[in-house]
Amino acid sequence: MSNKIKHHLTDDLLMAYAAGGLPEAFDLMVATHLSLCDHCRARAESFEAVGGCVLQDQDDSVSLSDGSLAATMALIANGAPIAKPARPGCSVLPAPLQDYVGGDVNAIQWRAIGMGVKQAILPTTREATARLLFIPAGAAVPDHSHNGMELTMVLQGAFSDEVDHFARGDVEIADEDLHHTPTADISEDCICLAVTDAPLKFNKLMPRLFQPFLRI
Amino acid sequence: MFTEIDTASLDEPVADGPLAKTWHAKERVRGRPVNEANGSCNTKTEWVEHVTRIRDAQDQAAFAELFQYFAPRIKAFLMKSGSDAAMSEECAQEVMATLWHKAHLFDPSRATVATWVFTIARNKRIDVLRKQRRPEPEDLGWGPEAEPEQLDVISLQQETAQLRNALSALPQAQRELIEKAYFGDLSHREIASQTGLPLGTIKSRIRLALDRLRHAMN
């Protein structure tokens, strides 16, 4: 299912996800990409295997209090088997995104941010921001650069910029050095998940004035 | 510790440190074939059989052995992540209770028991210490038809044992950085230089297991 994905996540992001060291918005990006990409899922699970080795081979020991096993057996007796969450099959939004949106694309609460572009900010911790972006077919997001790291993954349609062409499941990783103008393919409206650990910098005056309002 | 790891054979995955030594005698379940399917006693998949016994028979003896091995390690792991001793022990108990309640979801062709325990402990740390949600990928298909082949299970367990040996053979400075990343002492930006881990074979093996699950779904 992931054969067509050309742009993958980096080892350091997958390792940080496996180690549990990412801000929540980045966790959401990684979980969404892994839902579509078996190549990266296998890489992420192999980084989890490293975690298993680290857990086993700690070189100092701690002891448990008396009665710890009995306390755990009591927890077990009071609990119940944990079922897999019943999640809908993948449509436009993979399951981890649906958990944040409360449904598929029809449930997204869009806000217009100009020139037909819309966004929906998702509820995560504030260290980093996750938002869905809607770019009308053929439209462009204004030329901008980034203060920090920005990941953009296509969920529907496709876009092109100075770097390459990006389709469903592809992730573009942008940092301070990239100035780009993503333009949606003419064939279909483009929906992306974008995650950033710092506000974007727009290169034209007007969009910059709006940034505090838009949280982009 | 390094010398102990260097001399440990793959057939003794639990004889790896002072903590394990204490309970070594208890960890072998004598007189009970571990792999009942083929009648041989394959210690490479020993913990896997414990989880199967919990899943199929709510086997408290098997759980007690898993608890003795893993609960102190989970507690130590959480303490290194910045939690105090009392909180870490409480969380370790909850992690072990989760293991019991999720025994039916464990896939030994994709992870060792240690890897699986690590992921449960990691999620507990994110939940309790960082107080944030943990988005997880969409589940792959699951069901009786996807029961893994024993050969796949043994291969994955062996390759993880090899990964573990390779990690223990890394230069100490690199090893310490990797441990720091997993104990939560490095931010994601600081992790950038920590790649180059020997993951090639295990990655392919996990990929095969994912392909098998996808195939079973279709």
Image (cartoon, helix red, strand yellow):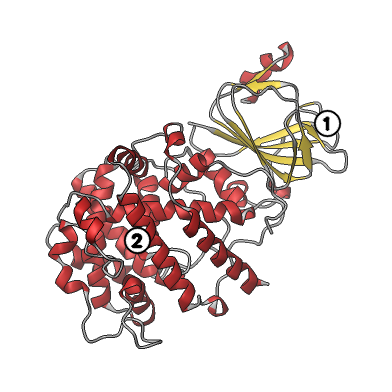
Q: Residue at x 33, y 36 (%)?
A: B185
Element type at marker 1? loop
Q: Residue at x 50, y 51 (%)?
A: A44
Numbered tag placed on residue A164 in the rendering:
none
Residue kind at label 1, given as amino acid type: Ala
Q: Looking at the picture, how far across and down is residue B171, in whole percent?
A: 31, 42
Q: Looking at the picture, how far across and down is residue B45, in whole percent?
A: 35, 73
**Quarter of the picture holding the C terminus of chain B:** bottom right
Chain letter for mark 1, please: A
Residue A171 drawn above or below residue B148: above
Q: Residues within 10 Å of mark 1 (few under 14, many from 20)?
A: some
Q: Which residue is mark 1?
A: A139
Q: Is residue B194 visible?
A: yes
Q: Looking at the picture, how far across and down is residue A15, in whole percent?
A: 46, 44
- Relative to A55, is B1 on the left or the right? left
Q: For this rendering, which residue is in front, A27 or A4?
A: A4
Q: Is residue A95 visible?
A: no
Chain letter for mark 2, please: B
Residue kind at label 2, given as amino acid type: Ala
Residue B158 drawn above or below residue A35: below
Viewer-side label of 1, 2: 2
Element type at marker 2? helix
Q: For this rendering, which residue is in front, A32 or A89?
A: A32
Q: Which residue is mark 2?
A: B114
